[in-house]
Amino acid sequence: MSAIAVSGLRKSYGGREVLHAVSFTVETGEVFALLGPNGAGKTTTVEILEGYRARDDGDVQVLGEDPGRAGSSYRARIGIVLQSSAVYPLLSVQEIVALFAGYYPSPRRPDEVIELVGLGLQRDARVRTLSGGQLRRLDLALALVGDPELVFLDEPTTGFDPAARRQAWETIRDLRSLGKSILLTTHYMEEAQRLADRVAILRAGEIVGTGSPRELLSGHASVEIRYRRNGSEVVLATEEPTRVLHELTAQALADGVELEGLEVHRRTLEDVYLDLTREEAE
Ligand SMILES: Nc1ncnc2c1ncn2[C@@H]1O[C@H](COP(=O)(O)OP(=O)(O)OP(=O)(O)O)[C@@H](O)[C@H]1O
Ligand SMILES: [Mg+2]
């Protein structure tokens, strides 16, 4: 059974439709990334799946339940990091994690979760004294303390420093290795490429690409070779960079010239994303 199955999902705000028949599935035990520009509809989709917003049309099944009708037992099976959250500023990290643990039938130990997200040194700090990145880590702790089967992470690493981001990736990989399913959104394409088993790319409420990062990268020439000749840029796209570079450099050596600004770039998920989400020229 899929962890999430969405089919023909539609949502309007005040008569303006922002999700146009969105369909995708997330398999159990998979990390799935929902990508797309600001306003594409990621948070709207995620909050419908969480049961926080009503949909207008379409079928949605999450852990075999309809989140539009599900009750508190459903809430206990999912963990949530909202895009922006505000928690009690006067409580300490330890107190708030323990408070949230109390809402769930079989929570993880608060101390263990605080360590897991790297807030061990801030255990007794009041929430209002935490930095932006530390607050985000607390959000992650609160999503995990209920030991959920499925975790929704809406931009979980926004504002993280590079080391904290890598630590969060490890945490997410650990969750997957425990058999949990994860739906995340992110604007960091490297994060999606490193972490996600599959991604879906939303553009203005429609899915314009879906598959594993590798699948999305295939079908395009995978390497670009760039250099300048007489001041203008030359770009060669190829599947055979070794041969093309060899020929190019051999010719340059024979001619006794330097290939100005020579660069070799392997296409990444970010290149595919930018191609798929580019605004069409009017
Ligand atoms: N409560 C609301 N009332 C009216 N319009 C809304 C509401 N929430 C979102 N929208 C609109 O719906 C569209 C999708 O918004 P959404 O927050 O889902 O985008 P997103 O993909 O999460 O963007 P971001 O990357 O900036 O978080 C936007 O045009 C937004 O203005
Ligand atoms: Mg959003």
Image: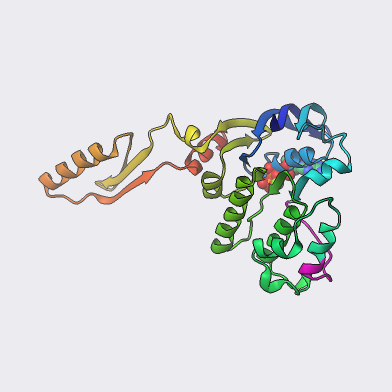
- Residue 202 in picture, x, y percent from top left: 63, 36
Identified at 79% across, 44% down, the residue is: 77
Q: Is residue 84 visible?
A: no
In the image, is residue 93 above or below residue 195? below
Q: Is residue 219 visible?
A: yes
Q: Position of residue 230 (x, y in %)?
A: 24, 46
In this rendering, would 74 be left or right of 216?
A: right
Question: With respect to residue 130, does 4 lie above or below?
Answer: above
Colour logic: rainbow
Say how many tags the image has. Answer: 0
Q: Would you say the magenta stretch is mainly helix, strand or loop?
A: loop
Tell me if residue 89 is in the magenta stretch: yes
Is residue 23 placed above or below 29 in the rendered structure?
above
Q: Is residue 235 magenta?
A: no
Question: Who's the residue at 62% across and 45% down the image?
Answer: 176
Classify residue 103 by image quadrant. bottom right
**Percent coordinates x, y for residue 164 in the rendering:** 59, 62
Left or right: 273 in relation to 7: left
Q: Residue at x 32, y 44 (%)?
A: 226
Q: Which residues are magenta?
A: 83-95
Where is residue 184 shown, x and y percent of the image? 65, 45
Query: Which residue shows up at 63% across the image and 31% down it?
Result: 207
Image quadrant occupied by the N terminus: top right
Between 19 and 58, the one lying in front of the other is 58
Quarter of the C terminus within the rendering: top right
